[in-house]
Image (spheres, rainbow, N blue to C red):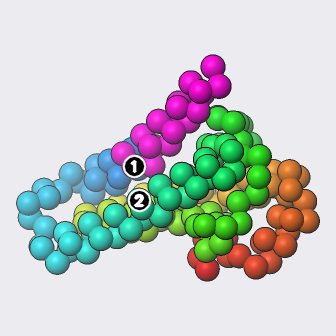
Amino acid sequence: MHKLREIAGYALGCLMFVLLIPTLMWLASGRPDFFAISAWRMVFAIVLAVLGLSLSVWSIVYMRRKGDGNPMDAFGHEVAPRTKHLMTEGPYRLSRNPMLTGSFIYYAGVCVLLWSWRALLVFVAFIIIMLFQVRSEEKRLRKDFGEEYEAYCRRTGRFWP
């Protein structure tokens, strides 16, 4: 059962962050034709998307290996087993939320690809929702890790170094 919850957590995260949000951005943009996109925009969008997804995947793998848990904690509800150790190294030395930072970079790439203010609105809405999620998660981390987490907050930015 433990392994099934973990797999479900990763699958849910992948569906939501990698597929659902970009699909919503594409639909909100009026379903633009990808063949009409200029080469420079396509290349720049792909570079951003790959960089963002790489940072997110690195963060997830690092958390799984070093934190002995899963990042999927949605507004205080444990979707999969939580990490047992505070992550402060690897991608977590760059940002307290490198998975989200990676997602933001990925969605910036999607915005460049779609070149639509409506896609940008979906992105902004996602950022606002995630700010609430992060604040909820920070309360839990303060409770779980106390002064160790407070010291980490003082030396590491929430999203950017």
Task: Return the x and y of residue 123 as percentages of the image width and height.
Answer: 44, 61
- Quickly name the residue at label 1: 18
Q: Which residues are magenta?
A: 1-19
Task: Return the x and y of residue 39 as percentages of the image width and height.
Answer: 12, 73
Q: Local crowd at mark 2 within 10 Å, few (<14), some, or many (≥20)?
A: many
Residue 88 appears in the figure: yes
**Label 2, label 1: how many angstroms apart (C-alpha)?**
8 Å
- Quickly name the residue at label 2: 53
Name of the residue lying farthest toward the front: 65
Residue 31, above or below 48? above
Name of the residue lying farthest toward the top: 1
Choose top left, top right, bottom left or bottom right for residue 153.
Answer: bottom right
Task: Return the x and y of residue 60 as percentages of the image width and height.
Answer: 55, 52
Residue 161, above or below 126? below
Task: Identify which amino acid the numbered label 2 is placed on.
Answer: Leu
Q: Residue at x 51, y 39 (%)?
A: 10
Choose top left, top right, bottom left or bottom right for residue 107.
Answer: bottom left
Choose top left, top right, bottom left or bottom right for residue 113.
Answer: bottom left
Magenta stretch: residue 76 in it?
A: no
Task: Identify which amino acid the numbered label 1 is placed on.
Answer: Val
Residue 137, above or below 91? above
Q: Secondary structure at mark 2?
A: helix
Q: Main secondary structure of the magenta part?
A: helix
Q: Are marks 2 and 1 in contact (CB under 8 Å)?
A: yes
Residue 125 appears in the figure: no
Q: Which mark is residue 155?
A: none
Q: Secondary structure at mark 1?
A: helix
